[in-house]
Amino acid sequence: MPRKNLDPSSSPRALLGAELRVARERAGMSQAELGERLFVSGSFIGQLESGTRRMHLEFAEQIDEILATGGFFARNCEAAAESKYPDHFAAAAEAEALATAIREYAPQLIPGLLQTEAYAREVFRAYQPTATEGTIDELVTNRLARASLLSDPTTPLLWCVLDEAVLRRAGDNTAILAGALRHIASLIRSRRIIVQVLPFSAGLHAGMLGSLKLMSFDEAPPLAYIQGMGTGQLFDDPATVAQHTLTYDLLTANALSPRKSLALIESVAEDYEHDQHA
């Protein structure tokens, strides 16, 4: 039975998941069996154990009772739940950091992992026009920290489908969007990411209802994340993930090829730069 509390400075969610695996196996239960007792799927238990999902207090208390762990998980749940992201996005951001592949459809804005500092600042200021500069600085810092995932030359694989509206939605300072598009083009040319643009000419398409993020992992089932205005939902149900995967596949089928997408991104960036100089 686990006896010591976790150290919050040393990846508490990962440690909590590892302790859950040990306690479950000691009790002679499979992931599916424990999931059945908690009224969740076995894959959900696997995601808790791998650290891709956050353990909430209600589950921690039930796990302590089922596995006879003396309140260990309830005591350490708070440390594992700490996050610098909004509640509706925290679980997705933390899963994103562990993913081996991320596929994302963005209908309105450049995805957070690809944003420049100037672009992110404009986005947050649009969301929160009365926020203090300190608040905006903190939001921008956290967003740029997420982008450090791309410092690894190969993992995770990042494949984005950008609606053409993403390329055209410029503010008063077109140089900001031009710089953001140049940043994306640089990542494409360095072969770090794959990007396709879904043109207006594609007409109605499978992603009309909003953004989509699919995440794959080495040791956990895939996840799908759907985000709306101030809301977000993470799915692990295999049928639901499969449906969202089909949606993404349909989007890539209707989008421009990566080569033509790069040409369009650089052409639009050049237009904005020309407008700025003019």
Image: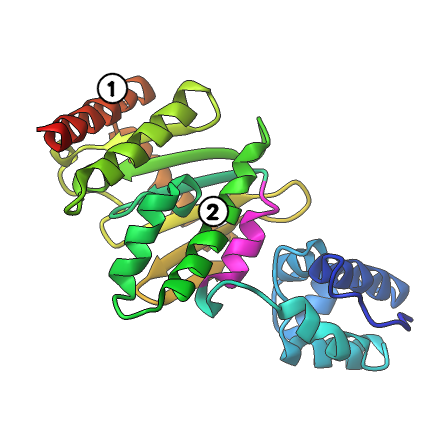
Residue sitting at 24 percent across and 48 percent down? 108
Question: Residue 144 in magenta?
Answer: no
Q: Amino acid at mark 2?
A: Leu
Is disc 1 surrounded by few (<14), some (14 to 19) or many (20+) residues within 10 Å? few
Is disc 2 surrounded by few (<14), some (14 to 19) or many (20+) residues within 10 Å? some
Tell me the CA gap for discs 1 and 2: 26 Å
Which quadrant of the view contains residue 1? bottom right
* 221 and 103: which is toward the camera: 103
* Image position of 154 (left or right of 67): left
Residue sitting at 31 percent across and 17 percent down? 259
Above or below 2: residue 11:
above
Q: Amino acid at mark 1?
A: Ala
Q: What secondary structure characterizes most of the magenta part? A: helix
Of discs 1 and 2, which sits in the foreground? 2
Residue picked out by circle 1: 263
Residue picked out by circle 2: 144
Under tag 2, what secondary structure? helix
* Image position of 27 (left or right of 78): right
Under tag 1, what secondary structure? helix
Q: Disc number at residue 39?
A: none
* 198 and 173: which is toward the camera: 173
* Image position of 252 (left or right of 6): left
State the image coordinates of residue 271 (x, y, percent, origin top left).
14, 26
State the image coordinates of residue 127 (x, y, percent, origin top left).
28, 62
What's the magenta region? Answer: 89-99
